[in-house]
């Protein structure tokens, strides 16, 4: 939650601080534990990288295994989302949104978050390298990620790690980046 608002603190933004973890962390830890890596400072978690080597398979698992968990916690909006929170909840009920033809050459995807106080010390690079190696071992030739275009600091980080833009015109409010896993 401390980095879920374009890199800033999102605590208190939604009706529950569980919403972002339920959409962007929990399914990965539960469905893809072999590609979930945590950074701790000896006493608490200060960062992580999570993802999948197979987005299409992950989407199927999300629908079959994660969606029932989510449906107990959140009501699916009956129509088009009327609020920003409803728009976020809809993401959880539509895992197929991750299946975009422009991303097919990058079948793996990831999410990374580091608390601000540990950023800039090489931990993010180490986490990404760890994830890339795990995705490559699982057979993924390339990885992608989606990011908030307002998060300039994250964009610089990804650029330095060799991520390049992937044009996805159907999703104009997200910047997609990709790179080979090796």
Image: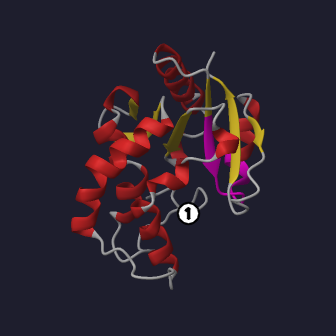
Dividing the picture into quadrants, the one containing residue 14 is bottom left
Which image quadrant for residue 78?
bottom left
Numbered circles on residues, count: 1
Residue 98 left/right relative to 38: right
**Which quarter of the figure is the C terminus placed in?**
top right
Name the residue nearer the viewer: 14 or 139.
Answer: 139
In this picture, which residue range is highlighted in magenta? 144-154
Is residue 132 magenta-colored? Answer: no
Q: x%, y% of residue 102?
A: 70, 43
Position of residue 146 measured from the top left corner of the image (x, y, whole percent): 62, 48
Residue in view at x 64 percent, y 51 percent: 147
| Figure quadrant of the N terminus | bottom left
* Relative to 61, residue 123 above or below: above
Q: Which residue, given by chain and number where applicable, does mark 1 sit on?
A: 5
Under circle 1, the secondary element is loop
Residue, x 21% and y 66% (percent of image)? 72
Work out whether residue 49 can be spotted: no
């Amino acid at each position: 939650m401390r980095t879920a608002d374009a890199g800033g603190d999102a605590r208190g933004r939604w009706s529950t601080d569980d919403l972002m973890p339920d959409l962007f962390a929990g399914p990965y830890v539960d469905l893809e534990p072999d590609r979930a890596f945590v950074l701790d400072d000896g006493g608490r978690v200060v960062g992580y990288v999570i993802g999948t080597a197979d987005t299409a398979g992950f989407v199927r698992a999300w629908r079959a295994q994660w969606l029932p968990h989510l449906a107990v916690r959140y009501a699916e909006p009956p129509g088009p989302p009327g609020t920003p929170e409803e728009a976020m909840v809809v993401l959880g009920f539509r895992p197929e949104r991750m299946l975009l033809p422009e991303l097919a050459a990058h079948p793996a995807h990831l999410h990374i978050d580091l608390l601000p106080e540990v950023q800039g010390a090489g931990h993010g690079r180490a986490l990404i390298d760890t994830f890339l190696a795990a995705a490559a071992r699982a057979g993924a030739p390339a990885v992608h990620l989606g990011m908030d275009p307002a998060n300039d600091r994250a964009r610089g980080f990804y650029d330095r790690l060799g991520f390049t833009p992937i044009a996805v015109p159907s999703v104009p409010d997200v910047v997609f980046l990709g790179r080979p896993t090796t």
